[in-house]
Amino acid sequence: MISIVYRRFPHAEGLQLPAYESEHAAGMDLVAAVPAGEGVVLAPGSRGLIATGLAIELPKGFEAQVRPRSGLALNDGVTVLNSPGTIDADYRGEIGVILINLGTKPFAVRRGARIAQLVVCSVERVALIASERLTSSVRGSNGFGSTGRSS
């Protein structure tokens, strides 16, 4: 287990901190830090940046991914637009979640609502090496929709 230092902004006071909701959960729920009694309404087809009131200090070699919550997607058609959103280890600003309403009804984002998941992952750095030719593989250059088909 790694430890992550966080900062809570004043507009998030009193809100639940991200936490794992089950023993084997990969993600911690992020909550909306929108003003109480106001919220944000996303019309069908619209998107908005939702504040979480939280900043984190990831260790070198890690990233955090902002991912959709399956219940919001299934029940309301609301998802994270740039999924997964990436938080780099050197970012120290507030985590924001870009939600989009792909549903048919307006969706109200209320203070404290669970809006996304935060998954922390290790990151490997790579070096690109130029080549005129790549090694062959069974798949080759067959692209989208090509796997799992019998010949």
Image: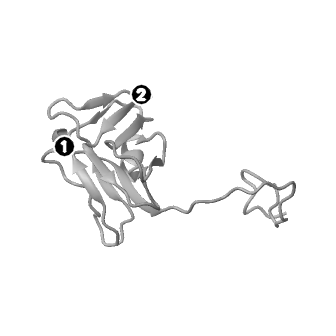
Q: Residues within 10 Å of mark 2 (few under 14, many from 20)?
A: some
Depth-wise, is mark 2 or mark 1 nearer the camera? 1
Q: Is residue 112 above or below residue 50?
A: below
> How far from the left and from the top, in percent, is residue 64?
41, 55
Please tell me which residue lies in front, 119 or 146: 119
Please tell me which residue lies in front, 123 or 46: 123
> How far from the left and from the top, in percent, is residue 88?
44, 50
- Locate residue 24: give its quadrant: bottom left
| Of callouts 2 and 1, the N-terminal one | 1
The residue pinned by badge 2 equals 46
Q: Residue at x 46, y 48 (%)?
A: 86
Question: What is the total number of numbered labels drawn onto the structure image?
Answer: 2
> How far from the left and from the top, in percent, is residue 89?
42, 54
The amino acid pointed to by label 2 is Ser
Is 36 left, or right, of 4 in this rendering?
left
- Number of the label disc, if any, that sits on residue 12: 1
Is 146 left, or right, of 93 in this rendering?
right
